[in-house]
Image (cartoon, grey):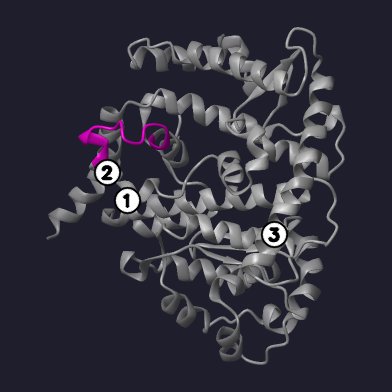
Amino acid sequence: MTRMLAQLLDTQEPQFHQTLSSLEAASGHQGHDIRLSESINQLQRTKLAQLGLDPEDTTGEELFHALQAKLKSDDALLIKRLRSISAYQVNAAANLSEGIAAAISQVTKDSLIFVIKTSVAKRAIAKFPPKKVMKALNYRSYESLVKHLPLGLMVAAAQELESSAWMQHYSAFLRTLSPRDFEERAVSVYSPHSDKWLALKSQLLAISKRTVMVNKELGSLVILPLPNQPVSGLATLTLASAANGLNAIYAFSSYLRLSQVAKDFNLRLMSSVSDEPRFEHIDYFSAPLSWETVIRFVHHLQGQLGTPLDTHIGAEELIGWQPVENLIQLIAPEMEFWRDCGHLGRLDGNSSVSFNVLDNALSLVNKAGYRERYSHHAKRALWQELIARYIRPDLLSEFIGAELAPKLATESVGI
C-alpha cells in the first residue's frame, strides 16, 4: 500500500516510507495510509465501471482516452449550463465567462473574507499608478481609472502588465500593512466585456496563459472573455481554475484572520501573497504544513470537531472552501462523475493516470497525448488528503498555539 501511494505521488519510496512511518508512530499507528489506499482502489474501480471499462482489463492509455471522451461530452453540457446561467442572470448575450462569474458569485454570496480595505489600497496605489493599464484601457488619469474600474480588476491587470518597478512599489505597500488595514467583505468576481477589455484580453492571455486571474489580498477573481465557440475543455478548465483560485483566496483569508494576533503579521502577509500559507515549524509532519491541508481536514470533519480546534478555527474558515470538483458539480450537476476525484489516480506501470478534472481539462485543451498527459493537480490533492488524515485535532490546536505563542509573548513583554 505504501508503494502504491509513493508511485501515485511520484515520490522516492524509501524516503516516503520513512515519512509515513513517523506519521504512523505519532498518530498511534492508525493505518491511515492503508485505508486511503483501499479507498482509492475502491473509488477508481467504481469510476471505471461508470465509464464502461473493465477494472481488471483496462490499460492506462485506454483509461486516459475514456476520461478525455467523458470530459469532452461533459464540457459540452457545461457550456449549455453556463450560457443558461448567463442569459438568465446577466444578459441575453449569454457569454460563457459571464456565466462562470455569475455562478461563482452565487456560491460565494454567504461567505466573507479577510482582505485589504479598498480605501487603503486606492490611496496607496495613487502614489504609483499603473500607467500601462491606464494606457491600455485609454484612461488619462488615475482618478478616472479608479472611478470607472473596480480596484480588484485594476490590480489584477496591473500585476500582469506593469513593470517590475511597479511590482516593487506594490510589494513595498503590502509590507506596511497591519490588521487594521483589513476588513471583512465578499469575494469580488469580474468578467469584463467592454470593447477595451476585449482588445486587452489577447495581451493578457499572451502573458499569463490563463483565462482566470486571482488576487488573494484583495479577494478578487477575474474571468477573461471566452470565445463563443471555445475549444473542447476550455469551459471546464476556466471554471475549475476559478474554483481553484477561490480556494486559494479562502485559505489566504482564514490564515491571515488567524494571524492578526501575530507580531510578524506583515511578514506572514508577504509570504502568503507569493506562496500558499503554511506553518513552517511543525516537527510532527517533518515538513511545513500547508494551511490549505488544514482547511481540507477541517472540511472533512465539519460538525465532528471538539472544543480544542474550534478555539482556533471557527465557522468562517469553513464557509466556502470545498474541493474543486465538488464546487463544479454544485454549479453543474452534469459534472457529477468528477466529484471526489480530485486526489484519484490509477497506476499504469510506474506512472499514473489522473482522474482530476483540472488535469484532464488541461490535457484536453492542450491536445496532450497519453505520454504528455497532466497529473500534477491529482498528486498535490493526494498529498494534502494523506497528510490531512494524520492531523489530530488536539495536536493541531497545540501547533497553532505554538506557532503564535512566541509572537504573542514578545508582544506582551512590551505592554
- Secondary element under disc 1, as helix, strand or loop, is helix
At label 3, which amino acid type do we have?
Ser
Could you tell me how far apart the alpha carbons at marks 2 and 1 are, in whole angstroms? 7 Å
Provide the residue designation for mark 2: 312
For image coordinates 75% across by 7% down, the residue present is 56
Given residues 67 and 382, the one toward you in this image is: 67
Given residues 58 and 51, the one toward you in this image is: 51
Could you tell me how far apart the alpha carbons at marks 3 and 2 are, in whole angstroms? 41 Å
Q: Position of residue 236 (x, y in %)?
A: 72, 47
Are there few (<14), some (14-19), or many (20+) residues within 10 Å of tag 1? some
Whether 366 is among the magenta residues is no
Are there few (<14), some (14-19), or many (20+) residues within 10 Å of tag 2? some
Q: How many marks can you see?
A: 3
Q: Name the disc covering residue 57, or none.
A: none
- Secondary element under disc 3, as helix, strand or loop, is helix
Provide the residue designation for mark 1: 258
Q: Establish if 179 lies above or below 281.
A: below
Left or right? Give the position of 332 relative to 253.
right
Quarter containing the C terminus = bottom left
Provide the residue designation for mark 3: 84
- Secondary element under disc 2, as helix, strand or loop, is loop
Could you tell me how far apart the alpha carbons at marks 3 and 1 are, in whole angstroms? 39 Å
At label 1, which amino acid type do we have?
Leu
